Amino acid sequence: MGRGRSLLNESSEGGAKAIVTRIHDERAAQRALRKAVIERVQEGAGSVWLCLSGGNALGAYQAGAYKALFENGIEPCCIAGASIGAITGALIVGNTPEQRLERLREFWSVARQWGSALYDWSPLNDGRSEKQMAAVRTMLTGRPGLFHPSLPGLWSLLPGMPNDVRLFDTGPLRKTLKTLIDFDLLNRSPTRLIITAVDVETGEDVAFDNHLQALEVDHIMASTAFPVAFPPITVAGRTLLDPAVSANLPLRALFSEMPEDDVTCLCFDVVPQRGGIPQSIEEALGRAFDLLFACQSKHALHDIQLRHSLAREGAPGIRLIHVDYSGEGAEVALKAFDYSKNSLNQRWEVGHSQTALALKALANLAREPGAFRAWRLTGTGLMELG
């Protein structure tokens, strides 16, 4: 009996060791495969530029996109951002690589906070009504860590009330940005950050570049100052607003000068160019919102392509991949003000998965020195744009 137990124990121990060894070998093989994939993606990407659009609460998509870039070892050397894209870019450049994802998570954690737990409640137990209620509540009461109703605000429309130019006060956002962004680090970073805005008086597009001047919180606040909703910001004597009214995807600012070397430009646009025919007032409002901003992106892309074709001989190769967020019918008309937890998590996850798909496809694209080629990400891969 004793000898039998001994053999049984030895057999069990041997089997356990074999299982542990097999698991260890499988994990080592997975790590090796993962490393090979990352190296292939990095080699295929080369020098990477990011172009980040505006879109308020939709910007969680960009945070998820950056997570995929980080996981694949992609370090952008130049970022242009408008509105929430400016915030995303500043959170990346204004923090060390180890801190960036955590700072992005912190920002969106602050963004989804309500003043009361009651704000997470909806009278109808379905996801769409929750999103609609979340957006309406934001329009009525703001977000504690971003903005709150201004006084007199909307009441200024009544006779005898003092004038106002905004519905919300953005003091909380200023405080949040100062907490999460190291501006000293941002301004000495080798990564170029371009933040865009538009001049209220002249209608001129304005760009601020951390390699040409010191950027401060006011530059970001100006880029996020969507007219009527938020107050304009004065920087260096110019009164500025959110550039979404002119160039929601800051491609022209990013390519104000052609790059000296070949680049891969990843454009993360939180409004889709394509969409269905609206079947309701809500859908019509949502599609109008998309078209208002997405058509700007289309025209900017054509402009960059034309400029490249007219550039000097020996111009660098440009590979541009346009990745947009459609929401697949899950978004509501007031989606830019829907900061509900489920919506923000969904956008983050979609941004991560779509970017991982784009990087996988990018690894299979050959570089063409001197050529300009552009693709749009679809559900099955990249589709070249004519």
Image (spheres, helix red, strand yellow):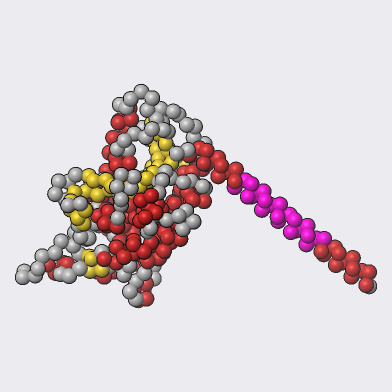
**Outermost top residue:** 313
> Quick check: 299 left or right of 262?
left
Looking at the picture, does residue 39 appear above or below residue 348?
above
Q: Position of residue 18 (x, y in %)?
A: 78, 57
Residue lying at 34% horizontally and 34% vertically, measured from the top left: 258
Which of the two residues, 265 or 233, is positioned nearer the viewer here? 233
Number of numbered discs overlaid on the protein picture: 0
**Outermost left residue:** 160
Q: Position of residue 281 (x, y in %)?
A: 25, 57
Is residue 31 located in the magenta-colored stretch of the structure? yes
Is residue 100 located in the magenta-colored stretch of the structure? no
**Is there any visible trace of residue 52 in the rendered image?**
no
Q: Position of residue 181 (x, y in %)?
A: 37, 59
Looking at the picture, does residue 6 appear above or below residue 360?
below
Which quadrant holds residue 149? bottom left
> Quick check: 117 left or right of 32?
left
Q: Position of residue 136 (x, y in %)?
A: 28, 66
Which quadrant holds residue 386? top left
Looking at the picture, does residue 242 appear above or below residue 5?
above
**Is there any visible trace of residue 18 in the rendered image?**
yes
Quadrant of the drawing holding the N terminus? bottom right
Looking at the picture, does residue 150 appear above or below residue 199?
below
Which of the two residues, 169 or 320, is positioned nearer the viewer here? 169
Residue lying at 6% horizontally and 69% vertically, measured from the top left: 159
Write down the region rendered in magenta: 14-34
Residue lying at 20% horizontally and 51% vertically, measured from the top left: 236
Residue lying at 20% horizontally and 64% vertically, measured from the top left: 167
Query: Main SS type for the magenta part?
Result: helix
